[in-house]
Amino acid sequence: MKRARTQSDRGGFTLTEATVAIIFIGLGMAGMLTSLSSGTRATESSYKLTRAGLLIREIREHTFAIPFDDLLTQTYSECIDGNGDAMDFEDQSHWSQTITVSRRLNNDLETVDTADSSNVKYVQANILYDGQSILQAGWLVTGEVAP
């Protein structure tokens, strides 16, 4: 005598099992996509910091190469290298370099020389990406000492 087939004898997955499997797979995929997007943001941030560090070094070299009296506050919308030449790189149009120059007293480097008579200048460089500051640095530049 043949036994009648019941629902459980058929094999395969039930609708509930398939739904649970889809939920687990979906959660795993969502976690992977979140991880991927945060990794992309971290890579972009590190790229900007690395590029800004290079641009700071270039503008610093430029400030040491030009005559002391020509060292003035200015903004370079086209980034320059240590020789003062325009740099050419892929996303250059997003970047700019700003330097702010102030004279400092010879015997007190923290105090601004309002008489503009000292031979020490403090240069502050700011590297911007689409107008947003990415990196700042400052250094002293000295001119010739009068006898």
Image: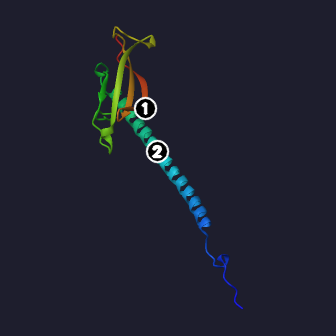
Q: What SS does tag 1 mark?
A: strand
Viewport quadrant of the N terminus: bottom right
Residue 86 in percent (x, y) is at 27, 37
The quarter of the displayed image where residue 5 is located = bottom right
The quarter of the displayed image where residue 123 is located = top left
Q: Are marks 1 and 2 in contact (CB under 8 Å)?
A: no
> What kind of residue is marked 2?
Arg
Report whether 30 appears left or right of 142.
Answer: right
Report whether 20 appears left or right of 130.
Answer: right
Label 1: how many Cα within 10 Å (few below 14, some 14–19, many 20+): some
The residue at the point 42 percent across, 29 percent down is: 136
Closer to the camera in the image, 80 or 35? 35
Task: Residue lying at the far bottom in this picture: please name it.
Answer: 1
Residue 6 in percent (x, y) is at 67, 79
Residue 96 in percent (x, y) is at 33, 33
Q: What SS does tag 2 mark?
A: helix
Q: How many marks?
A: 2
Between label 1 and label 2, give the one nearer the viewer: 2
Q: What whole-number distance in Å separates the C-alpha atoms at marks 1 and 2?
A: 18 Å
> What kind of residue is marked 1?
Leu
Q: Which mark is residue 51?
A: none
Residue 130 in percent (x, y) is at 35, 35
Marks 1 and 2, the one that precedes in the sequence: 2
Q: Which mark is residue 135?
A: 1
Closer to the camera in the image, 104 or 97? 97
Viewport quadrant of the C terminus: top left
The residue at the point 45 percent across, 11 percent down is: 108
Q: Which mark is residue 41?
A: 2
The residue at the point 34 percent across, 10 percent down is: 117
Please, which colouring scheme is shown?
rainbow
The residue at the point 46 percent across, 42 percent down is: 46
For residue 56, above or below residue 36: above
